[in-house]
Image (cartoon, rainbow, N blue to C red):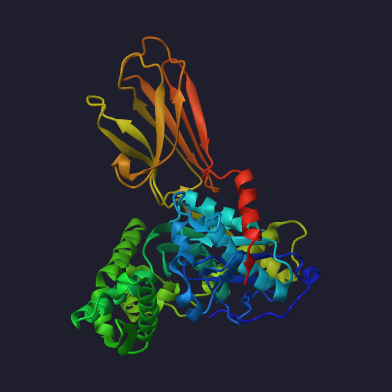
Amino acid sequence: MADVSSTPPATDSEMGDRIVGIDLGTSYSALAVLDEDGQPRVIDNSNQSPLTASVVLLGDADQAEVDPDAAALAQCPPERRVVAIKREMGNPRFALRHGNRRLTPEILSALILTRLRQDAASRIGPVRRAVITVPYYFNELHRRATRNAGQIAGLEVVDIINEPTAAALTYAWTRGALGKSGPSDSRRILVYDLGGGTFDVTLVEITAAHLRVRATDGDTMLGGMDWTNRLADAVAEDIIGQGGTDPREVSDVGFRLLQVCEDAKRDLSTRMVTTVQLAHDGRQYSIDLTRSRFERETADLLQRTRDTTELVLVQAEITGTDLDDIVLIGGSTAMPGVRAMLEELGGKPPSSILDPQLAVAQGAAIHAAILEARHEGAGGVTGQAVIGRLRAISTSNVNSHSLGVEVTDRDDVQKRWNHIMIPRNTPVPCQVTQRFVTNTDNPRAIHIRLLEGEVSNVESCTVIGDFQVVDLPSGLAAGSPIEVQYGYDRSGHINVSAKELVGGTEASVEIHWTDGIDDTALTEFARLARDYDVD
């Protein structure tokens, strides 16, 4: 396990305004820096813990408590209780009302980031710049929302890094080979990241100077909270079977049910039997739960993660036994069923070199240090030998979602489908050119509609943009060739151009994944966030 400890207070000049790494998680968040000895250190919060619960309790007027204690959270009205807000990132339809304020996922996430920034400032000096992590399977809209949350919190977000990539950096850096000169064997590791609310699995190849992502897949709506919900359902059914009413239908009781089931889930990681106590209907219910029952109730959830893992291995054209290591990330990997499944898949126990709950923040700190080391004159308190190692490291990624264009059937224009031009897991940057044909005579314009998604059904894909080729030659016949070029760069920018080859007319568009929040709106959101007294 990488060294993780508190750091003593330091002045801003001592820290040199360093970039920090932040793991903005569904259940817990953490902030880390790379120290002068090259150790990624997670900074304790004001509660003397390296982890800050990603929970917000909205109080009266302008009060917001991040990481409240369980008792305060249970007594809070449900409309003022914010949990798992990460699952709503990039959702323009989600917002909470607090007084006369409309709080979006970006503002609520910014409150969590503000707490992290404030707590870290007392130990390492003012925090102004950060690298923030996201699940690999986040699309660019989710990533933009995360970047906005950092800006609202008063941070300059220097970069966004994928959580599995960050974890792989921590793994490679901790083993001591990454960034060192001389020959090095390539290692293939599988990063299995099961957090509180999201799931990713990513295959990474590591050499002394390069970290290369080979394949990735995941689910932004699958995580440990789903295992907790299954336990809550089981306990509720037992209570109903004993003649009680459904505790899930009473908001405060339902919340307490989730709390005790979360505790029971953790107990069952180390014990074979645990007991849940719940006051409801004027009675005190006592429900015994066994690990075997828990694993039966959640077997389909675990199988979903196995199916995704096996798919990534197939896409990378290797088997589980070809892996050098399986790296566990996320607190939910503490469940014995997860470890047993992965041991069966890989033929050996998963690695225990990392702390599953801290490795992502540590990797973000390493990535931040790499960015600093490449900047002329950077370094701060980091030693020159460490800076040399950092400058030697490079990374490469793949796109996590397929990109395509909408096409129509030449014989039936009502039939449309998504034609994928850049499949997921394509190394980026990349550029693809393909030829299509017009399907009507003498068109006034050619409409190019851009899609993100893995299926042919257009309605199941996300529309990411469109444009038109106009001023076409008169009398252009059906079946005339159209050349479409699709490009995707390292920053997530998409460039698409289309050229009608008979007359040479062309048009193009660049997609920057704007989410409808302009600079004026961001300024207003930041003002709203600053109005809150964050504890």
Q: Residue furthest front?
A: 282
Rendered position, 486 above or below 268: above
Rendered position, 489 above or below 352: above
User: How many labels sit on residues?
Assistant: 0
Residue 485: give x, y in percent of width and height: 45, 33
When asked about the image quadrant of residue 476, the answer is: top left
Classify the position of the C terminus by image quarter.
bottom right
Rendered position, 68 above or below 154: below
When asked about the image quadrant of residue 371, the answer is: bottom right
Query: Is 161 on the left-hand or right-hand side of 385?
Result: left
Observer-nearest of 42 and 368? 42
Q: Residue furthest top?
A: 474
Residue 115: give x, y in percent of width and height: 62, 69
Identify the residue at image location x=45%, y=63%.
204
Residue 479: give x, y in percent of width and height: 31, 20
Identify the residue at image location x=48%, y=39%.
487
Identify the residue at image location x=75%, y=70%.
15
Tell me if I can see residue 142 in this picture: yes
Tell me if I can see residue 392 in this picture: no
Observer-nearest of 456 and 197? 197
Observer-nearest of 382 and 270? 270
Rendered position, 481 above or below 86: above
Residue 4: give x, y in percent of width and height: 59, 80
